Image (cartoon, rainbow, N blue to C red):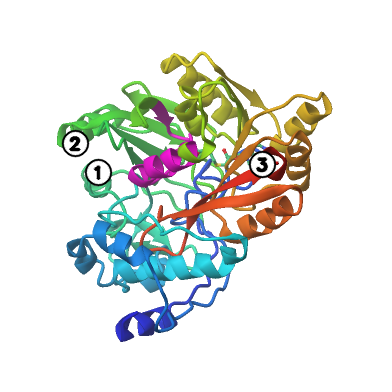
Amino acid sequence: MTEAGKRNFKKINHSKKPVGSKIQNDHKDSANGHSKKEMGREQTAKKTTCPVRKSGDDFKWQQKANAVVKPEGCDEAAGCPLTKKCGGCQFTKVPYTEQLKHKQMHMRKLLGRFGKVEPIIGMEQPLYYRHKVHAVLGRGRKGEIISGTYEARSHKIVPVEHCLIEDEKAQAVIATVRRLIKEFKLYIYDEDLGTGLMRHVLVRRGYATGEILVVLVTGTVVFPGKNNFVKALVKEHPEITTIVQNINDRRTSVVLGEREQVLYGPGFIRDELCGFTFRISASSFYQVNPAQTEKLYNTAIEMAGLTGKETVIDAYCGTGTIGIAASRKAGRVIGVEVNKAAVRDARLNLKDNAVKNMTVKQDDAGRFMLEMAARGEKADVVLMDPPRTGSDKNFLSAVTKMGPDRIVYISCGPDTLARDLGILTKSGYRVMRMQPVDLFPQTEHIENVVLLSNKKSHR
Ligand code: SAH
C-alpha cells in the first residue's frame, strides 16, 4: 500500500451515522421489509480497524485487481467533498486498487481460518454504480430547493448535486425534479410542521433496459398540476417509462408510505440479470449494483455445481432473482421469503420468465427449514442469502439436520458470515471456496459468496 493510501485508511472513521431516513424494503432487518443489504445510505454503527499491508505479503489477487480496474475511473474518486457530512462512502479518497487491497486483507483476516480467500472481484468502473438513488427534498438557507441526504445524527439535509456512486442519469432526473418544483411553485414538505407536498424523490434505472422509474413521495394525496409536472419531467427525460406518486403523511424517517398511485406508465420497470427479466416497482428489493450482482449470482450458481437434477432451496429469496437464475440448471427450486410484497414480486417474476420448476413460499426461512427437515424432506443444494444480521439458530440447525451436499452462502455481513461459518463447520460442513465481490466500491461494505460441502458426501 502506498504511503498516501495508508494515511487515508488511517484517517477513515468507520463509525457510521445513524439512519436519517430509511427506504422501505431497502433491506431492513424486519419481517415487513428487507435487510440492510442495499447499503449506501442505510448503514449500521460498527468500528473496524484498517489493517495496513505488511511488506512481503504475497497478494496474487493484485494481478487480477489490476487487470480489471481502470485507473481513469479512480482519478475522479480522488475525494468527495461531502464525505464527512454525508457519511455514505468511507473510501473516496483512496484509489480503487487500494480499496480492493484493503477489503481483501480484511476478509483474509476475518475468514482466513476457514480456508483460502479468493481474489476479490473488483469493478471495472467503480463509480456511478448505484442504480437506485434516493434524495430527500428541502430548502436551503436562501430558500432555494435542495435535495440530498440527511447529515449524520440529524435531520439536516446535506445538499447533494453530484455523487460519485449514484447513477448519473438518475442524478440528472433529480436535478430536473428540483427545477420543476420551483417552476410549478410546489410546496416542500416541512418535517417539523408535518405540512407541505414534496418529500422525497426515488429514481431507479434498469441496468440492461435503461428504463427509469421515478417515485415522487408526497405528504398529501392532492398534487396540484401533477399531469403537467409529469409531462414536463418525461419530456426532459424520455427514458422515464413510469412515474409513481407515493403518499407518506406520517411523521416518520421511513421514506415510503403505504399508498401509491401510478401517474404515468405501468408502475414498474424491468431489468435483466443472468438472461432473465425482473420487474422493479417502487418498493421492491433489487440489488443496487446490477453489474456486480450478475457476477455474484454467476459465482454462486457455479459454486452450486448444478447438473439439472438437484432440488435447490433459495432461502431468503427476496424477489426470487437467484433462484430464477439457477432454475434452468436445477431439477426444482423452492424459494422461501418472509416479506409478502417480495413474495408477490417473486411469483410475478416466475410467471414473466415462464419458470415452471420453481415455487416460492412465504415463511420465516428457519421455520420453513425446520418443518421441511422434520418431514424428512431433502434438498441437494441450499442457496442462502440472509440479511446483514446473518442466519439464525433454527435455520442453521435445520440445514445441518437436512444435510444438503452443498450450501452456498451469500452474505453482505462479513462478521455474521464468520459467525455462521463457525457454526456450520462445527456441524459437518467444510468450507471449499470463499469469494469476495465488491458490490459497494467507495464504501467499506463487502459481499462474499462461500461454498460449503457436506463432509459426509466426501466419504
Ligand atoms: N436473495 C435476494 C434477497 C436477499 S436480501 C436477492 O439477491 O435479491 C435478504 C432477504 O431475506 C430479504 O428479502 C428479506 O426480506 C428476507 N428475510 C429476512 N429475514 C427473513 C427470515 N427470517 N425468513 C425469510 N426471509 C427473510
Q: Which mark is residue 458?
A: 3
Q: Disc 2 marks which residue?
A: 237
Residue 433 pos. (x, y %): 53, 51
Q: Which mark is residue 173?
A: 1
Q: Secondary structure at mark 3?
A: helix
- Whether residue 28 appears in magenta in the rendering, the answer is no
Label whose residue precedes the other's in the sequence (1 or 3) = 1
Q: At label 2, which amino acid type do we have?
A: His
- The quadrant holding residue 340 is top right
Pick the residue in front: 407 or 135: 407
Vertical comparison of 184 with 149: above or below: above
Q: Residues within 10 Å of mark 1 (few under 14, many from 20)?
A: many
Task: Judge whether residue 197 can be spotted in this image.
Answer: no
Q: At label 1, which amino acid type do we have?
A: Val
Label whose residue precedes the other's in the sequence (2 or 3) = 2
Alpha carbon separation for disc pair 2 and 3: 57 Å
The outermost residue toward the right is 374
